Amino acid sequence: MPGFLFHQVVFGPVRSRRLGLSLGINLLPLHSKYCSFNCIYCECGWTPPGQKESQELPSRALVAEALEARLKELNKEHHLPDAITYAGNGEPTIHPEFAGIVKDTLRLRDRWSPASKVTVLSNASMVHDPAVFNALKTLDNNIQKLDAGSDRMFHLINNPVDPVNLDRIVADLARFEGRVVIQSMFLRGTYHDEHIDNTTEDEVTTWLERLKVIRPSMVMIYPIDRATPVRTLEKIPEKELKLIAERVASAGLKVSVY
């Protein structure tokens, strides 16, 4: 399955179920996925092998140029976005110029669309990098992924391309001291003869303990919404997601189901 890809550096704005009208910034290649994870539910499809040797990323200057041009157009049309969002064809924070791109984005936002919230949708794999961490702290919406509490379920669902320690990710997320939003995808199904389900009592309890360590400002819970590379995955009913959300709220954390 090739997946759904964005073929522009700046795309949209598009309507987002979480962010409102969102203008996207794709810091990854325009015709293939480039990511530190290989999530079984990713709408972009599978992460290609040998990606680091074959991919060309848009430069910092190109991103700034494309963003300013689009913001000027939207300003003239009186159609400014609610959010300016780093998303696209993989993990945005692996771009080597991510910190500089954030500075440029904030400057251009302030000039052309001051009400827009600069946002990132990230898998948290680069939070350990000091430059990335400090850049993320300057964003209006620092949205990071945590799909599982146990290391086994984390690896089954997110399939990190390089070795990643879930304990380290959680510890790094806690360093934001609440200036972080956690997004969590819930699903179940099978893949390579493995049963995958992060909605069980044990898995939800373990995930919730991780959230208590991180203490995010918000937890976003959501189900599969688009086609996935693994066809055997099941969309979790809203009723079940709301039961999980009730447990998050009982822990004193703000939560929304999408």
Image (cartoon, rainbow, N blue to C red):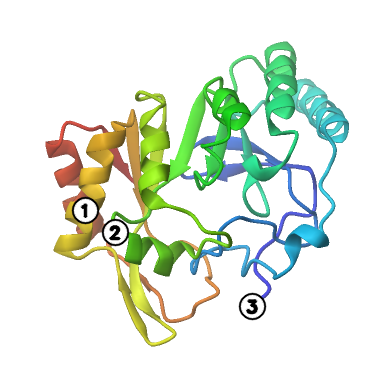
Seen from the viewer's position, the closer of residues 111 and 155 is 155
- Which label is found at residue 1? 3
Q: Specify the amino acid type for callout 3.
A: Met
Please tell me whether mark 2 sits on a helix, a strand or a loop. Answer: loop
Q: Residue 236: where, in percent of width, then height? A: 30, 65
Q: Are marks 1 and 2 in contact (CB under 8 Å)?
A: yes
Seen from the viewer's position, the closer of residues 257 and 201 is 201
What residue is drawn where x is 54% and y is 42%? Answer: 121
Q: Which residue is label 1 attached to? A: 206
- Which label is found at residue 219? none
- Which label is found at residue 150? 2
Q: Specify the amino acid type for callout 1.
A: Thr
What residue is drawn where x is 47% and y is 37%? Answer: 143
Q: Specify the amino acid type for callout 2.
A: Ser
Q: Is residue 4 left or right of residue 170?
A: right
Q: Residue 215: where, in percent of width, then height? A: 28, 31
Q: Residue 7: where, in percent of width, then height? A: 79, 54
Q: Is residue 92 left or right of residue 38?
A: right
Tell me which numbered mark, 2 or 3, is placed earlier along the sequence: 3
Q: Looking at the image, which residue sits at the far left?
A: 250
